[in-house]
Amino acid sequence: MADFEKLGAEVVGISPDDVKTLADFQEKTPAPQRFVSDANRTVIKAYGVEIGVGSLTLAKRETFVIGKDGKILFSYFDWSPLTNVNKTYAWLQQHPQN
């Protein structure tokens, strides 16, 4: 996370899970970013990342870089969290936000 912060980025994960589920996950998983619950899916719907898979409704693992003016500067989608991190970090290296 320090590498992202040096480039002027704050990393936040948004999940449809409830607060307790996210707190349990954060306690058991060494994920360095903080997570925010979007249990009513307001943000997920607003960013167009809600998808149906069979009878399930999920959120795609899409990464967004949002500028200080609130505009989306970059987005990248891959089911692999590591690929999302690497692609976003590479973009930020070329477009630091400090």
Image (cartoon, grey):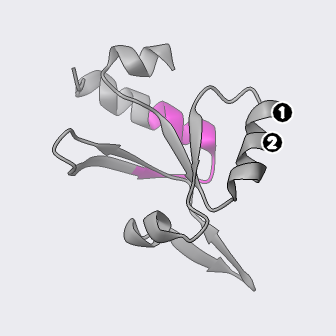
Relative horizontal placement of residue 93, taking residue 82 as reference (left or right): left
Residue drawn 42% across and 50% down?
76
Q: Position of residue 39 (x, y in %)?
A: 61, 65
**In the rendered structure, are the residues bearing label 1 and label 2 in contact, judged by CB atoms less than 8 Å apart?**
yes
Element type at mark 1: helix
Dot label at residue 85: none
Q: Residue at x 63, y 62 (%)?
A: 16
| Foreground pick, 57 / 40 | 40
- Residue at x-position 73% and y-position 36%: 26
Q: Position of residue 3 (x, y in %)?
A: 44, 15
- 85 inside magenta stretch: yes
Residue count near mark 2 (Cα–Cα under 10 Å), binned few <14, some 14–19, many ≥20: few
Pick the residue in front: 73 or 17: 17
Q: Quadrant of residue 34?
A: top right
Report the mark closest to the observer, 1 or 2. Answer: 2
Task: From the top left corner, tell me how far across and down residue 33 is, in percent.
Answer: 57, 31
Reading the image, the residue beneath label 1 is 28
Point out the stretch of residues depicted in magenta.
76-87
Residue type, mark 1 in image = Lys
Tell which of 2 and 91 is nearer to you: 2
How packed mark 1 is, by other alpha carbons closer than 10 Å (few <14, some 14-19, many 20 or more), is: few
